[in-house]
Every structure is written in structure tokens, then in C-alpha cells.
Amino acid sequence: MVSLNHWKLLTALVAGAILPLSFAPFEFFWLAPFCYAALFRVWGGASPIHAFQFGFAFGVASFFSGVHWVYISIHDYGEAPVSLSLILTATLVVFLACYIGLVGWIAARWFSTIGPWALLGTFPALWVFLEWCRGWFLSGFGWLSAGYSQTDSWLMGHAPVVGVHGISWIVLISAGAMLVLIDATSRQRIQTLTFIMILWGSGLISGNYRWTNPREKSLSVALVQGAVNQDLKWRPEQLVPTLDLYQKLTEQADGSELIVWPEAAIPALYGQVTDYLEEIHGKAARQKATVMLGILRDDPEGGTFQNTLVALTDPPLFYVKRHLVPFGEYFPVPEFVRNWMRLTSLPYTDAVAGSDNQLPLEIAGERIAITICYEDVFGAEQLRFFDNASLLVNVSNDAWFGNSIAPHQHLQIARFRAAEVGRYLLRATNTGVSAIIDPRGRVVARSPQFVPDVLKGSVRGFLGFTPYARWGNYPVVLGVLLTLLLHFVPMTKFTIRS
């Protein structure tokens, strides 16, 4: 006979596997609270070890379903053996799942897991706190944070105020409220329903409020998407065709004041193609345009190499990627593992990170805050740019993930970064999804995937602080810690008295 705990474990697995449907490209945002509510239900009254198991099962199912594309980048394009690719992917999924398991274990060990206080207070607050920790601990991996599921819901209006973690908190409170409405007294139901209506309704109202102010002059822009297959990109014979391709696409951007190419658009070091880039700069300057492009360069201080974005101006302006990708751009492994990687022809060389004190680049009359690739997942790290920055630019190469859900999830994350600080964001990628995103996080225009394209549009620089740009995640983190303290103290008193 199947025990109740087995049924709870199965419920957690199914709810976790369904959860990624609430994120891009599916975007069934209403599904997220139901999935979290299912997990909260099985956590109710569970022992610490069972609560960890249920949370871990939910995490394994959701992260495997939602970030399995890591295998594509490691195996299909990184050319790692199948066994190593599976081990690395499984390790990431298990590590991320432990965060969810830890939420359940802490709740069952030190708090009550039954009743409205647990559903509306303990579970949501613990989840958000561990989600915030997941975003920075050991380099951080903020993918599938609960708030990202809400880019097309009313809750997106809260992004400039509380950021993605604040919206995660509201989603998780909503999940708990669904269970309170089932089990609570009539008075509790009315109070809970009123509270949830205020949270969601205020998001709709806030979404219509403009926290930042546009500059008078508009800026014509063009995003160049080369769509060079990752399998071919770094082959020596592909260099000349790639140079010709980007030159022709840039000519199609005639009339644009700012032209942006994607991350590592040219498969060569900056010093190897200076003549070509000077030619591109000369042609653009005659048209009163500036070209920005991603390219690798030798480290000027004698290290290995840097992942940079260069603006072709006089003199050229560089931004150097600060937050590097573990096992992609640097390898946090012992030397004997690095030696083995060298012998097996796997990548083993660490890139050199840029300084944290880099300022926005002044280009085409705007002060532009730059991020490269998945740096845009770390929203709080970008706040040092404000109020100086008037425009956001992200260059990326999501070709590493093939025709998977990853590029769509990455675009969804970028939408949050624009909304949190109230600026336009220009997102140029190699194979898509290139897009122009407005200050409310809405996609104004986008390129089709996997085809060469020049996406033209008009944007404005914006100035001023949103509440999130001013305070970052501090209010939310302090709020969840205060909530946990208020719930923990009564439980402690109860334990001492008993």
C-alpha cells in the first residue's frame, strides 16, 4: 500500500515539473501560485526530514524541467563527454534543489507549518530569503526565481518598487492564501482575500505610474543579429564570412545613431581585427553612428583574456565583463582537475574579470550601463550605475543553448532589469532573442530566432531613481527576516514554556 508520504512526494514532484510552464516561453503566470500551493500543502505538519525530502523533490523536478538546457551548452557546444555533461548538469540541479529542501527543513524544524501564519508568513518569507541567497552564494544562479514568472501579470507593476524578489514574495503569499481560503474561518477568508486583492490591484496601479523621466531627444538604434551557428563560429575558415556578414548587416542599419552587435560577435581577439574595426568605425562615423560590439581581447595587465564590449569611438571605449560564468569563463576546480581538462582538450583557461567600479559608457549622447550575457541576472549588481545611466544595453550569445527554452527565459529576465530601473534596454544576441524592451519591461520589438536580422527602433534615455534602483533588495530582505523573527519568537516561547 502506498503511504501518505509517498503521495506527498509524488505531489511535490508533479508540481515541480509543471512549475516551469509559468515561465517563458510558455508564460502561464497564473500557474505558479498553484504549484507553490501544492508544495505548501504537503509541507503542512511534516517532520523536518520529510519536509526536506518534499522540497528537494519539488526542486529536482522544477530545476531539471526548467534548466536542463545546461546540458546542451556543456555537451553539444562545449564538447564535453556525455558522462561529464550529465554529472555537471545533475550536480547543478541537485545543488539548486537543496535550497528548496532547506526551506522545508527550516520551517519544520523551527517554525509551525500549520495554519495561516505558516502559509502567509513562514513559508513565503523563508522561500524568498533562500531565493535571495541563491542569487549570490557561490557566484549565484537566480534562474527560475518565482517573480520572473510574472512578467505579463499585474504584479509586474511592482518591479520598480520591490524588484524580482519582492514579486516572488507576493506570488508565494498568494500561494499560501489559496490554501487559507480553503481551510480558514470565514473571517480569515475575508481578510486574506482582501489582502491579496490589495497586493495584486496595487500592482496594476503601480504599473501605470512613471518613476523615471524621459530625456527630450530620442535615439535611433539598430540591433544586429548575425545568427552564426555556434558549431561553426570559431572555426578559422569562418572568420572572413563572419566579418563580411556583420559588415553587410551594419550597412542595412543605415540611419541608426547607435548600432549594437552581440557578445563575442567577431570570433577573434580585438588586436587581431583592428584594421577591420577601424573600417567599420569610419563608415559608421560618416553616417553619424556609433557601433558597439562584443569581442574578446588580451588582458592589458598580462593575464589571459577578457570578455568585453567595445564602442568604436575615438578612442575606443571598453566595458569588461565583471561577473564571469563558472565552468564557462572560469573553472573553480583544483589544479589536478585543470590538468586533466587540459589533457582531454577541454577548456581550462580562466578569463580575467573586469573591475566592479566601471562607469557607464558615454555614447551617442547617452550614458549606457552595459551587461554581457548572464550578468543581467544579477540586478542588484547593476544598481551602482544609477542615477548616472540613462540606457541599458545587454549583449549575449544564447546560441550556446540551441533551440531550447533558455533564450526565452533569458529575455524574460532582461525584461525585469528594464522595469526595475525604469530604462529602455537594448538586447543584442547572436541567434536570438534580440529585443528592444521599454521602461515597463514590455517587448517593443524583437528579432526572429536563428536568422540574420537587423532590428531597428527608437528609444529615449531616462533619468531618475525608481525605489528599487535607490534601495535595491534591502527592504525585501529586511522584511522577510522581520517576518521570520515575528513568527520564530512565539514558537520559541511556546517551546520554552512547554
Image (cartoon, helix red, strand yellow):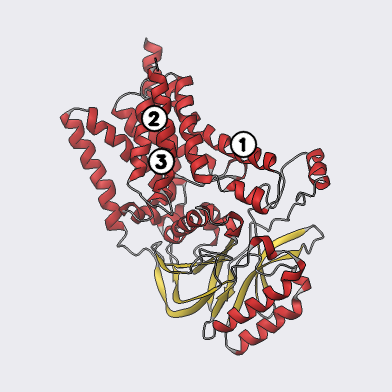
Check disc 3 and give the amino acid type.
Ile
Image height check: is 482 above or below 72? above
Distance (Cα) linking label 3 and label 1: 21 Å
- To which quarter of the image does residue 86 belong? top right
Secondary element at image label 1: helix
Question: x, y percentage for residue 16?
Answer: 43, 37
Residue identified by numbered label 3: 18
Looking at the image, tell me whether mark 2 or mark 3 is earlier in sequence order: 2
Crowd around label 2: few <14 · some 14–19 · many ≥20 (10 Å): many
Image height check: is 14 above or below 308? above
* Mark number displayed over residue 389: none
Q: Residue at x 48, y 30 (%)?
A: 57
User: In this orientation, which residue lies closer to the viewer: 483 or 88?
Assistant: 88
Distance (Cα) linking label 1 and label 2: 23 Å
Image height check: is 21 above or below 110? below
Residue identified by numbered label 2: 11
Query: Is residue 426 left or right of 233 when viewed as pictured?
Result: left
* Mark number displayed over residue 91: 1
The quarter in which the C terminus is drawn is top left
Q: Note whether residue 30 is visible.
A: yes
Tally the marks: 3
